[in-house]
Image (cartoon, rainbow, N blue to C red):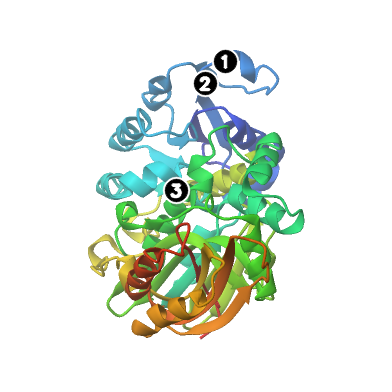
Amino acid sequence: MAYAMEPVRIGILGMGTVGQGTVRVLERNAEEILRRVGRELRVVHAAVRNPARLAGLGLDARISSDPWAVVRDPEVEVVVEVMGGQEPTLSLLMAAIAAGKHVVTANKALLAEHGNEIFAAAQAQGVMVAFEAAVAGAIPIIKAIREGLAGNRIQWLAGIINGTSNYILSQMFHAGWDFEQALAEAQRLGYAEADPGLDVDGGDAAHKITLMASIAFGIPVDFAHCHVEGIRALEQTDVVYAAELGYRIKLLGIARRRADGIELRVHPTLIPESHLLANVEGPFNAILVESDAAGQSLYYGRGAGGDPTASAVVADLVDVARTMTADPSNRVPHLAFQPDAMSALPLLPMAEVESAYYLRIHAHNRPGVLAQVATMLAEYEISIEALVQKETPEADSVPIVLLLHRCREGDLERAIARIEALPVVVQPVLRLRVESLAEG
């Protein structure tokens, strides 16, 4: 079969794991991609700090150590950005857009913090910014929300969207390790960076849920108002207590539509042990979406790694290639909704969120402590659903674990402040949210 159209000429910024993976996928599946697109996707220019690292890749393209050379190359039609970071990356992408080049990026942090600016510039220039690889690796969640569920009103979505934290929590549950042991093993296996803060403190998941919320609800990208908590404060005993209560602990990104605004939050969450999300293990990701017509749908797969992320990059390149010659007004909008139809719904403060809760209270082993705690909770109309308290008469301090019925977070925080002020309480109270994730 003959294809008359010229190849789509691609420039790549960054030739690390994902950049090289993109080249390999394009080469390995070249015939399949050609059959799908009707045009060859050809890398013509790549930027890499150390060109010697590409010696075994067999890339037939210009190689530059300066990424600006790729952006300014008149032959390049699509710029793939997989170098990461904020600057000079933002300036490079804005320059590419100003020059009329389409952009494919895996840079979740850049889009979460500067997405409104980037998408507005692309809209003005009539070019595309594709970012499937920025959210969940190989899982096509952006396309699913933006196109597959386009006929739905999405109520909420909840996801395990950081593989490092999920691996750590899985090991704390299955191997009985504490946080530090599980983190060290994640680093040894390459799941965690030497500085794991972005993963274990929730920032990476917050970048991703911020982008998904914008597409799900048609709101501007607003990372600054996403509530973020990580998993460092969890003890292995919390995993055990949660299991005794019938739950697993997962780091979730949650976005929920309410009449008065949008909840946008990342935090460790207790999920019923029978739920599908509770059984997502190791470095895998999964996102659960609830919408009015489709009900619940679950998207599962590898959320990181060279080839899985490259899969999403190449899928974006295929989309760009298919629509390059289309009228920009007929393309799928970057954030799923028409730019002049974005919602003004505010992001709600955590004090307004309602949830069930898990509390771990370390207190001196004295009579009447639980009664004092229950009285303070009752003053804020917060009731106890379940209790775990180990009998250790010889210990000076013991943990009291409570499962609470649904209440406002603001009310609970005021109750916790009073509980922590009790002379018998020996350390800050750990508070985790509990989500049923039930349909309806």
Q: Image check: 273 left or right of 110?
A: right
Mark number for residue 51? 1
The residue depicted at 53 percent of the width and 80 percent of the height is 294
Amino acid at the residue labelled 2: Val
As measured in the structure, the alpha-carbon distance from the residue carrying label 2 to the one carrying label 3 is 27 Å
Tell me the element at label 3.
helix
Residue 209 pos. (x, y %): 44, 58
Residue 13 picture location, percent across and down: 47, 29
Task: Report which quarter residue 107 is drawn in.
Answer: top left
Dot 1 crowding, Cα within 10 Å, few <14, some 14–19, many 20+: few
Q: Position of residue 331 (x, y in %)?
A: 38, 58
Residue type, label 1: Pro
Of label 2 and label 3, which has the lower sequence position? 2
Outermost residue toward the right? 175
Q: Nearer the viewer, residue 29 or 390?
A: 390
- Residue that appears at 53% across and 53% down: 231
Q: Nearer the observer, disc 1 or disc 3?
A: 3
Disc 2 crowd rating (10 Å Cα; few below 14, some 14-19, many 20+) is many
Where is 290 relative to 108, above or below?
below
**Can see residue 151?**
no
- Which numbered circle lies on residue 89? none
From the viewer's side, name the closer residue of 70 and 92. 92
Give percent across and percent down for residue 207. Answer: 43, 50
**Cα distance in 3D space between marks 1 and 3:** 32 Å
| Marker disc for residue 203 | 3
Element type where label 2 sits in the image: loop
Q: Residue at x 55, y 15 (%)?
A: 50
Judge whether 267 appears above or below 153 on screen: above
Q: Are marks 1 and 2 in contact (CB under 8 Å)?
A: yes
Q: Please give the label number shown on residue 48.
A: 2
Label pair 1/3, CB-CB below 8 angstroms = no
